[in-house]
Amino acid sequence: MRNFKVILWDIDNTLLNFTASERAGIRMCFEKFGLGECTDEMLEDYAEINIKYWQKLERGELSKDQVLVGRFMEFFEKYGRDTSVVEAFNDAYQLSLGDTIVFEPYAKELVWGYKGRYKQFAASNGTLLAQTKKLKNSGLSEVLDGAFISDEIGVEKPMQGFFDAVFAAVPECTKDEILIIGDSLTSDMKGGADAGIQTCWYNPKCKINNSGLMLDYEIHSLREVQELLGPVLF
């Protein structure tokens, strides 16, 4: 066990299975807007488009609004769907994301098990609307000690300003006592490393780290978090 006091949990694809909520939300919105069938192939294409846009946000190349609308504009244009409904579609999609809650394996047991033992916070670049609903519907809002959401802070991970907000909220802790756990090398890990806190890359698909980042820890199952923070009951 390490001498940590504060745990920053990424939400999407770390605590919660984002792919499940993404697919359910898009299909529900396709039906709502009368856009026809959304196939598995289309969803896979959208996921790649979406990642591309969020990475541009992390690099400061696009604003959040440009990401939210631009990804669906490109997706709809590719499949010949009505682009005039893109903004309304995105609004409905944000609401739908919190309707499907699927925890990543061992995530729920860990967060509940560490309650009272560590200060635990969500740390997310997702929209305030979507993330607030996810935290409420999952029960995480009742267990975590708070949430750092970029829409509220006004700065995205991996920017220093995001982590400055964290430091301001936990002034009693040193940087060595803060651990961020997340699946994204470009936001969670880069942001944590640049800010000088401990980093733990959740890498269930065993991807190769070609980012050049020197990470403190890498895990392939959230169950391995116990090696850093101590055991919980499963």
Image: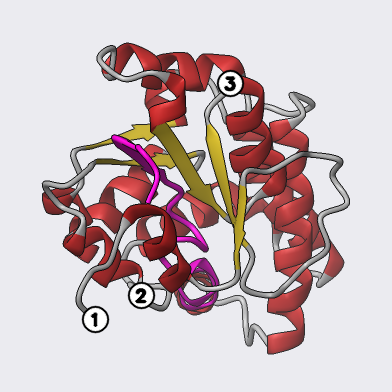
* Residue receiving disc 3: 195
Expressed as whole percent of the image width and height from the top left, the position of residue 36 reads: 62, 84
Closer to us: 45 or 91: 45
Vertical side of 32 occupied by 92: above or below: above
Q: Residues within 10 Å of mark 2 (few under 14, many from 20)?
A: some
Which is more N-terminal, label 3 or label 1? 3
Identity of the amino acid at label 3?
A: Ala
Badge 1 marks a residue whose secondary structure is: loop
* Residue receiving disc 2: 106
Closer to us: 49 or 103: 103
Residue 144: mark: none
Vertical side of 22 occupied by 131: above or below: above
Closer to us: 228 or 130: 228
User: Residues under labels 2 and 1: Cα distance?
Assistant: 8 Å
Residue 43 lies in the magenta stretch: no
Image quadrant containing the C terminus:
bottom left
* Residue receiving disc 1: 234
Q: Which residues are magenta?
A: 1-24
Q: Residues within 10 Å of mark 3 (few under 14, many from 20)?
A: some
Badge 3 marks a residue whose secondary structure is: helix
Name the side, left or right, on which 25 lies relative to 65.
left
Badge 2 marks a residue whose secondary structure is: loop
Q: Residues within 10 Å of mark 1 (few under 14, many from 20)?
A: few
User: Looking at the image, which residue is at 36% across and 48% down?
Assistant: 131
Q: Disc 2 vs disc 1: Cβ atoms closer than 8 Å?
A: yes
Name the side, left or right, on which 140 lies relative to 116.
right
Identity of the amino acid at label 1?
A: Phe
Which is more N-terminal, label 1 or label 2? 2
Identity of the amino acid at label 2?
A: Tyr
Residue 174, located in which quarter of the rendered image?
A: top left
Which is more N-terminal, label 2 or label 3? 2
